[in-house]
Amino acid sequence: MSATQTVKPWQLKVQGLTKIYGAYNERSVQLTGPKYDTNICPETNSIVACADIDFELFPGEVLGIVGESGSGKSTIVKQLYFDLENTAGAAFLAKYGEGDINILRESNAKKRFIRNQLMGMVYQNPREGLNFLFSSGGNIAEKLLMAGEFHVGKIRQRASTLLERTEVPTARMDDSPNHFSGGMQQRVQIAKAIANNPPILFLDEVTTGLDVSVQAKVLDMIRELQRDLHISMLVVSHDLSVIRMLTDRTLVMKNGRIVERGLTDQILQDPQHAYTQLLVSSLL
């Protein structure tokens, strides 16, 4: 590193991230959002899924994004993981291009490298994150192969270690996730997501659809993994109890915009925005 280069204090920096579906004009963002209580532009009928999203995620931090269905929270992580193409905005990773390159404008080949080496993703539906034609160990092997590990013995050992770490019986390493419960499928998905030791992990509604007792076990495991691996996490959830358990800071979203941000404890104890107050009161 040259004398003129500085280490970025953040792991991930997002600026002006915007996703609009359909034909839009310059007023589409202006005529939508919490002020109008809609994310549908009255002039073009375009859907402003999210707009002007800015935040930073710091090393070892767990940042939550909370909001009701349709608020745009999942759209954010899917753009950052390249599942969706953004309409506008930029994102920077401290461990890529010295933090000075907009990863959303990179080539598809470079995006694949970023996904495979620097990120992990755990989806709400395990079928989005797992290949059900592969065994549980095979799913982890797939991630390791894409990250450049080709030694069969090392891959199998890593898969066994990760499954044990995420409380999946190693005796079932060669079984298809099809034969697993929903909670166990999520644990395999988490094992796959952290296989390459990524600095950033995205978690999108990972406990939705699970039984309450299973939710608690999955959340405990995520918290333990984060503490031990010191990984930065972006946690998306409509459930404030999940946000309270996992996160350090929280962004509150409504109609595609961030309406409040701050320390999670602060937001839960003294919410300032009317919408956040409504969310918190529903938790009590």
Image (tube, rainbow, N blue to C red):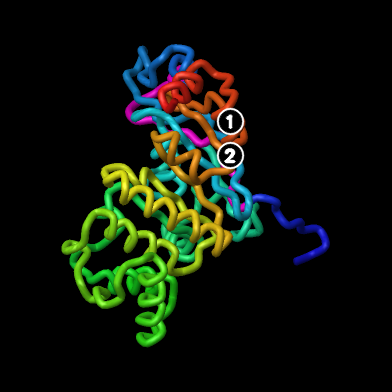
Residue beneath label 2, please? 249
What kind of element bears circle 2? Answer: strand
Identify the element where label 1 is drawn: strand
| Coordinates of residue 91 in the picture (x, y in percent) | 55, 46
The image shows residue 98, relative to residue 261, as above or below, that is below
Q: In this rendering, does residue 186 appear at all?
A: yes
| Magenta span includes 68 | no
Q: Are marks 1 and 2 in contact (CB under 8 Å)?
A: yes
Q: Is residue 26 magenta?
A: yes
Find residue 216 and report its horizontal and vertical position in percent: 38, 49
* Residue 108: mark: none
What stretch of residues is rendered in magenta? 11-28
User: For the residues marked 1 and 2, what is the alpha-carbon distance in whole angstroms?
Assistant: 7 Å
The answer to which quarter of the image holds residue 281 is top left
Q: Is residue 15 visible?
A: no
Q: Quadrant of residue 268?
A: top right
Give the residue pinned by disc 1.
Answer: 261
